[in-house]
Amino acid sequence: MRRLLLTAPLATAALLLTACGTTEPAADEAKASTEAITLTDASGAKVKLDGPAKKVVGTEWNVVESLISLGVDPVGVADVKGYKTWDTAVPLENDPKDIGTRGEPSMDTIASLKPDLIVATNDLQASAVEQLRKVAPVLQVKSADGAGQIDQMLENVDLIAEATGTTDKATTLKKDFEAKLAEGRKALADAGLDGEKIAFADGYVTSNQVSIRPFTATSLLGEVNTRLGLKNAWTMKGDPSYGLASTDVEGLTGLGKVQFAYIGNDKDPNADPFGKQLAKNSVWKSLPFVKSGDVHRLPDGVWMFGGTGSMEAYVDALVEALTK
């Protein structure tokens, strides 16, 4: 931060004010809080702000998590109930206005909040983003990138931090995240699990049909697992953005002896087919990792597509499950 030079009389006056216990902000702090900011977001658009954004709306849970982690309580959040259900690792600290669904946020509701900034992702339809830009400046981030998920997650944190004047906090978040990865890797290595094969997936039931979504090596959790010294057991290719694949229970037969981990949710009866709908399935019961008891349901509320907070919670949960 650039500091302003004071002439002798001004310096004397400043000292007198300090001695009297004034709460007036320093000149450089006042300047920093009002300096205009221009950023280039993931869409290539120039985003101009009068100063660090304070009243911020988040249209996707990963950006909401990053805002909270940076110390910015969003005034508007898409699907508040869903966030509270699926992301308790980084809980909401305030009572934001629900702006509608993540795919179709309410323009009228957002406009009524008079935000300084709207943080969205490239998953939101371009037409919706154009409408949002008529309400307030929109900062788009790239939700996922199969070529480097962790790098993308941290890049998003940095971009949001620049827009909200919280770059120091972003630096701390990144250091804490790296420290957590190192701590988790050491714990697994000490337990003799370095190089252990792991298959993480989630599953859901639609019309009585079980669908399984493997998180391949190019998914966010897949990258975290690799950084922990584990080997991803999925051989199928994931989609270019999220690194996710699709299979059914028969598709699990080629995994062999692995550690199988997943996250469900008690508030969604269709979110744990491994512990419920497949419990009596003959194919499921015949799988080596099921027979050996190496199926680990991790705690609810760790958002699998979240930010550093969710990923740290995932590391803690996985290490505890594999080493107990």
Image: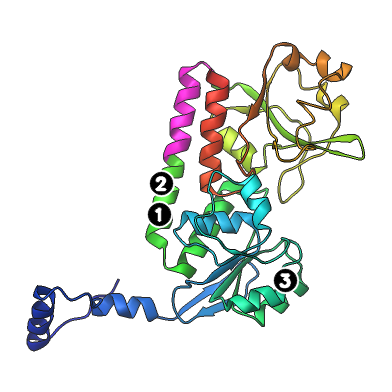
Q: Which residue is mark 1?
A: 171
Whether residue 116 sits left or right of residue 270 in the image: it is left
Neighbor class of circle 3 (other Cα within 10 Å; few <14, some 14-19, many 20+) is: some
Q: Which mark is residue 77?
A: none
Is the residue under label 2 in contact with that under label 1 (CB below 8 Å)? yes
Hey, which quadrant is residue 193 in on the image? top right
Q: Nearer the viewer, mark 3 or mark 1?
A: 3
Q: Relative to the observer, which residue lies in front, 41 or 266?
A: 266
The type of residue carrying mark 2 is: Lys
Residue 175 seen in render:
yes
Would residue 93 be counted in the magenta stretch?
no
Looking at the picture, does residue 259 appear above or below residue 115? Answer: above
Would residue 186 be counted in the magenta stretch?
yes
CA–CA distance between discs 1 and 2?
6 Å
Q: Which mark is residue 175?
A: 2
Q: Bounds of the magenta span?
A: 179-193
* Number of numbered discs on residues: 3
Is the residue under label 3 in contact with that under label 2 (CB below 8 Å)? no
Q: Relative to the observer, which residue lies in front, 195 or 116?
A: 116
The type of residue carrying mark 3 is: Ser
Name which residue lies at 60% across and 39% down. Answer: 223
Name which residue lies at 46% across and 68% down. Answer: 164
Residue 141 percent coordinates (x, y): 61, 63
Looking at the picture, does residue 72 appear above or below residue 247? Answer: below
Whether residue 114 sits left or right of residue 15 in the image: it is right
Q: Which residue is mark 3?
A: 106
CA–CA distance between discs 2 and 3?
36 Å
The type of residue carrying mark 1 is: Thr
Q: Which secondary structure class fits the magenta region best?
A: helix
First of labels 3, 1 by sequence position:
3
